[in-house]
Image: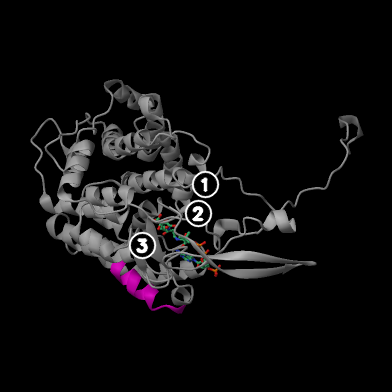
Amino acid sequence: MDKMTDTAIATLHYGDKSLQLPILKGTVGPDVIDVRKLYAESDAFTFDPGFTSTASCQSALTYIDGDAGILLHRGYPIDELANNSSFLEVCYLLLNGELPNAADFAKFEGNITNHTMLHDQFDRFFQGFRRDAHPMAIVLGAVGALSAFYHDSLDTSDEHQRMVSAHRLIAKIPTIAARAYKYSVGQPFVSPRNDLGYAENFLRMCFAVPAEDWKPNPTLSKAMDKIFILHADHEQNASTSTVRMAGSTGVNPFACIAAGIAALWGPAHGGANEEALNMLKEIGTVDKIPEFVQGVKDRKYKLMGFGHRVYKNYDPRAKVMQETCHQVLAVVGDPDEPLLQVAQELERIALSDEYFISRKLYPNVDFYSGITLSAMGFPPEMFTVLFALARTVGWVSQWKEMIEDPQQKINRPRQLYTGPAKRPYVPLDKRG
Ligand code: SDX
């Protein structure tokens, strides 16, 4: 695992001390300054709220060059994977490090396909939610509850059990997500079928009804599969870091993924796709864009689906998502969808406006996904559920990498204390 090479030294002068800190190089991307011995040798911490300059781990899964707008999974560019691979093949790649040969892929796909069902008693778990619960609340609870049903393989120190749990999560998350949707619309649950592909099986579990035969649409199944690939993994984002933080305590993987789902739900992170569509609907028509943009500049609200902590260029996923949006609208919905016109004009205006240019704000993966998913029949409250469904493979692959990293230990950041200095207790009758 340890691919870092220790080549040079950074010297830190602090008070009367001069510290020699190793500089570590990865395969590609910024070097890191190894500060692990800083506190022991200087009695000082580093300070980096939001971790804008901090590498929390070493990883071989995903590389992002934010300035160049590059995203690689195990070295393969995201657009090449999205346009040539399948989501399950990308799952194999993220989990195992290499694209599978035909025999290995058939075995992996067969394993996932044969574990998509949930324990029969699990379905009663859904009945405990209000019908108007947000589907993310249901998925969050259900994934955490998996540790109450599948506790025969929770020994994180056992490689085989780690892979069993990883496969179970990848296999069952579409069934859970589809059940969350069906429950929210008051329709009966639809069981997975072993003769359908991963994305097609999910679409059928969401949109099939007992009253009529479900008609597959290869364009939509392919689009769904591609959207899953675009959301599979993304380095040490907030929800992945949450999964790693939880996993560093040794808790079971189902609880870790539930923690990741909770973090993803936030509007600054995975909840942005739902907010971006709501924003486009609020703008409504192209002529209202200038007034909305002025509101952004006046800091009344953010431009949802724009900006990124790492990408200071166009998010490469957004390009593929826009292409997918056109493909979907050509088959369902309106190729001249007014919201797409608004989105494209908003993007054009933002990319030519100094306020956004100076802040390096570009569309991210969430900007076009809402229009696409809406045209496919999903309500906005399901958008982040779809993000979580796809990101489950990234979370579980990062969790597995962390467990297998010999340098890994329980995550325990420190702080800059700014509270009161030590003071004596004051009894109630002595307080002013
Ligand atoms: C995802 O980390 C990942 O990899 C996440 C993700 C993944 O796959 O896991 O890529 C998925 O979460 C994509 C991002 C989805 N979120 C949104 O679309 C919400 C809108 N975006 C913003 O909230 C924001 O851009 C963030 C949260 C994504 C990034 O915030 P940062 O890195 O803290 O940005 P910043 O505060 O340093 O911004 C710099 C400037 C600031 O202006 P000034 O104070 O310097 O004048 O840009 C402004 C910000 O106010 N700004 C925006 C803006 N994003 C940043 N202004 C208007 N609209 C925005 N969207």
| Real-space CA distance between mark 1 and mark 2, rounded to the nearest whole angstrom | 8 Å
Q: Of label 3 and label 2, which has the lower sequence position?
A: 2
Question: Which residues make up the magenta segment?
Answer: 343-354
Is 407 or 396 nearer to us in this picture? 407
The answer to whether marks 1 and 3 mark residues whose Cβ atoms lie closer than 8 Å is: no
| Residue at point 51%, 41% (across, down) | 248
Q: Are marks 3 and 2 in contact (CB under 8 Å)?
A: no
Point 31% across, 64% down: residue: 318
1 or 2: mark nearer the eye: 1
Q: Answer with mark 1 or mark 3, whichever residue precedes in sequence.
A: 3
Q: Which mark is residue 408?
A: 1
Report the quarter where the C terminus lies: top right
* Three-letter amino acid code of the residue under disc 3: Ile
Q: Nearer the viewer, residue 290 or 352?
A: 352
| Point 11% across, 48% down: residue | 217
Q: Vertically, is 69 above or below 109? A: below
Viewer-side label of 1, 3: 1
The residue nearer to you, when weighing 252 against 5, is: 5
Q: Which label is found at residue 239?
A: none
* Residue 283: mark: 3
Image quadrant assignment for residue 315:
bottom left
Find the distance from the CA under tag 3 to the CA under tag 2.
41 Å
Tell me what residue is drawn at x 19 percent, y 30 percent: 191
Q: For the residue labelled by badge 1, is the local secondary structure a helix, a strand or a loop? A: loop
Q: Specify whether 400 is left or right of 86.
A: right
Instruction: Give coordinates of residue 309: x percent, y percent.
Output: 47, 63
In reply to whether residue 182 is colored magenta, the answer given is no
Q: Amino acid at mark 2?
A: Cys
* Res 57 label: 2
Where disc 2 sits, the SS reads loop
Residue 344 within the segment the image draws in magenta: yes
Q: Are marks 1 and 2 in contact (CB under 8 Å)?
A: yes
